[in-house]
Image (cartoon, grey):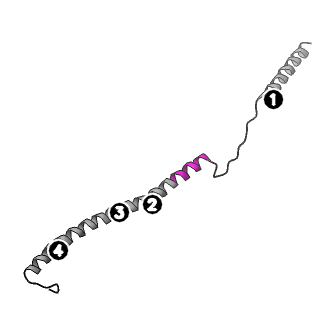
Amino acid sequence: DEAKTSLDDAKIKLDDARSAIDDIPTGKLISLTREESASILSYDSACQSMKAIAVVFPLIFFLVAALVSLTTLTRMVEEQRVQSGTFRALGYDKKD
């Protein structure tokens, strides 16, 4: 009689445990493509920023180089103009 009561108690506990397991919400499995992944999107954004910098940086570099060249050539032409004027005043021709 005591064994039957113990067995019935165990069955009740087992049924309660099974119902508790059934009450646990199930998880969701989500599958993302490569383009939808957050880390890939972040990496792609960083690459796009680098591409933009790679286009702008050489333009700035060449602009600065052109301005330095222009300034240097302007100064050289001005010096040569004064020298050429002096030589012409002394009687030299353009051919000399």
Mark sitting earlier along the chain (2/3): 2
- Where residue 16 sits, quadrant-wise, is top right
Q: Check if residue 36 falls in the magenta segment.
A: yes
Q: Nearer the viewer, residue 52 or 74?
A: 74
Query: Disc 3 marks which amino acid?
Result: Leu
Q: Quadrant of the C terminus?
A: bottom left
Q: Where 92 sits versus 35, above or below?
A: below
- Judge whether residue 59 is colored magenta: no
To which residue does mark 3 refer? 63
Which of 79/34 is in front? 79
Read off the residue under disc 4: 81
- Label 4 vs label 1, nearer the camera: 4
Q: Nearer the viewer, mark 3 or mark 1?
A: 3
| Mark 2 vs mark 3, CA separation in Å | 13 Å
Q: Which mark is residue 22?
A: 1
Q: Residue at x 79, y 25 (%)?
A: 20
Closer to the chain start, of discs 1 and 2, is: 1
Q: Amino acid at mark 2?
A: Val
Could you say which disc has been placed on residue 55 in the image?
Answer: 2
| Label 4 vs label 3, nearer the camera | 4
Indicate the amino acid at tag 1. Answer: Asp
Give the mark nearer the N terminus: 3 vs 1: 1
**Which quadrant of the structure image shows residue 95?**
bottom left
Measured in 3D between alpha carbons, the distance from the residue under mark 2 to the one under mark 4, in whole angstroms, is 39 Å
Badge 2 local density, few (<14 within 10 Å), some, or many (20+)? few
